[in-house]
Amino acid sequence: MQKLRNIAIIAHVDHGKTTLVDKMLLAGKLFKEHQHVGELIMDSNDLERERGITILSKNVSVRWKDYKINIIDTPGHSDFGGEVERVLNMADGVLLLVDAFEGPMPQTRFVLQKALGLGLKPIVVINKVDKPNCRPEEVQEMVFDLMFNLEATENQLDFITVYGSARDNWMSDDWKEQKQDISVLMDAIIEHIPAPIENKGTPQMLITSLDYSAYKGRIAIGRVHRGVLKAGMDIALVGRKGDVHKTRIKELNVFSGLGSEKADEVVAGEICSIIGLDRFDIGDSICDLEKPEPLDPIAIDEPTMSMLFTINNSPFFGKEGKYVTSRHIKDRLDKELEKNLALRVEPTDSADAWNVYGRGVLHLSVLIETMRREGYELQVGQPRVIIKEIAGEKNEPIEELTIDLPDEFSGRAIEMVSNRKGELRTMERKGDRVHLEFIVPSRGIIGLRNNLLTATAGEAVMAHRFIEFQPWKGQIEKRQNGSLICHETGTAFAYAIDKLQDRGRFFVFPQEEVYMGQVIGENNRDGDLTVNVTKNKKLTNMRASGADDKTRIAPPIIFSLEEALEYIQADEYVEVTPKSIRLRKILLQEHERKRK
């Protein structure tokens, strides 16, 4: 047990967690000399690679000087807080990674608060010290202040700091002195992170993660809290609500490198995966059969946002997807609930629609994106924040928002956030950029990123995290411009789009198939306008006076999934299929919309 260390790596999005894990894997000599290894080894699914963010936490282990180090890579985004909370239970210490220029950011605070609350010992890694205009000493002071504000214990405040550049594969005690490798960090982990305490007694383990294998079925992952687990032993599985049923461990595995290896027994403090348990959930406890003593289940922060998921009933349904019926979507949402702890699904009056609750637009959009890649077709309504009644008063979720942007755009940004009921808390200069911090309702953040990037020529860097529920802040002005709606089903022609360009900006290409009621553009004015883009030029045998004018069409606006979700109004849906993202009105017929 003395030769084992369990650590989690926590940081804000993009401060270099997954890159550091890559270098630790290389330091642990997991790969052969001739083997070519890509970057971001741990971000294994396509979505994570494309977005450059970690979504699912993962376990890996490396050997260093005859010590075994279990590493847990965690997501940095507060929308995936459910992932962070449950995996921190498996660690004895954390590596807190901070950018040498940006310093602690909102999500740094979010994940650090969770780690300190669990009593984990931190090692601070100040990364990216090779950046120009970095300020490692200042950042180290800021981290200390942050920990002090989060009420860290004296033992936690007595942390050591390692400086370096994960990308360039070096770490050092002094940021001005570049070393050859990251051995300083690996030695610090062994020296300063405590070994797991070996609790003797009856076995106890909390299931904190799930895995799935087509051959072995569902696999439970967790850390043995007390006693010893053995392959083939009978155990009691205790659910969240206290229900107990008897089951047997068929096979035990411990993590070894990027994979796992069989073990006959696992002692307290080690992280393992168990095969052969039937019907278990995250948060259940594995206990002694004779005298079950369950551990406390994982407490997860509540969701702050909801969206309506419904079947695709547009005129183009079933053309691209494999799974289109309500039964398919319901089964898929139920499957997601098993491992996505921060998600909740509630039925509605209709058998074809469900209210899905999550931690934010990103949390839910990652689920939608995963579903469309698996071949599902569905429609999603406008994101809505969750309103709570507290002491007879209407309360809504409030977030802390930080924006980093060039000096000349700061006034515009403050004005935009203030219009959305945001309050400016701090404003400080960092070189030629300005750092702004606001307290703003979650409603105000929906759709803000797009407008902010447009106003700042793409320079603004924005991050936010949920703080608490506060009394309702009043009405926030919505999108001013109405929609351009397609008049009839057919093919969009360049000739028609050209003649309508003075009406607004379009979202469709010429020769694209469109249907009646589809939102094909943004009106220049408020209010919706129905236009006919399927009208082609009539040819006659009469010679026209003057040459035909060439059509010159501005390129259409193409939305990503999050942008589309943040853009739509209350009477619109986003239609999501494996190949397309379309916007549409809920009521496709114009006379029905007028009657409504």
Image (cartoon, rainbow, N blue to C red):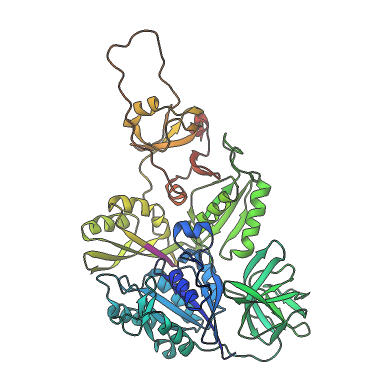
Q: Percent from the top left, x then y, of residue 326?
A: 66, 46
Image quadrant in which you'd find residue 214: bottom right
Q: Which quarter of the rendering shows the N terminus?
A: bottom right
Q: Percent from the top left, x then y, of residue 106?
A: 39, 69
Check the image and name the residue furthest to the front: 34
Check the image and name the residue furthest to the top: 542
Placement of 194 over or under 533, stated as above or below: below
Placement of 104 over or under 388, stated as above or below: below
Instruction: Report the magenta residues as a range.
Output: 463-467
| Residue under the image location 24 percent in, 64 percent down | 433
* Residue 465 falls inside the magenta stretch: yes
Q: Is residue 173 left or right of residue 62?
A: left
Q: Nearer the viewer, residue 212 or 451?
A: 212
Image quadrant in which you'd find residue 138: bottom left
Placement of 533 over or under 336, stated as above or below: above
Image quadrant in which you'd find residue 257: bottom right
Could one spot residue 305 in this view of the protein?
no
Q: Nearer the viewer, residue 418 or 448?
A: 448
Q: Percent from the top left, x then y, of residue 413?
A: 28, 57
| Prevailing secondary structure of the magenta residues | strand
Could one spot residue 500 in this view of the protein?
yes
Placement of 463 over or under 481, stated as above or below: below
| Residue under the image location 51 percent in, 36 percent down | 596
Q: Percent from the top left, x then y, of residue 574?
A: 50, 44
Q: Nearer the viewer, residue 78 or 161?
A: 161
* Residue 175 falls inside the magenta stretch: no
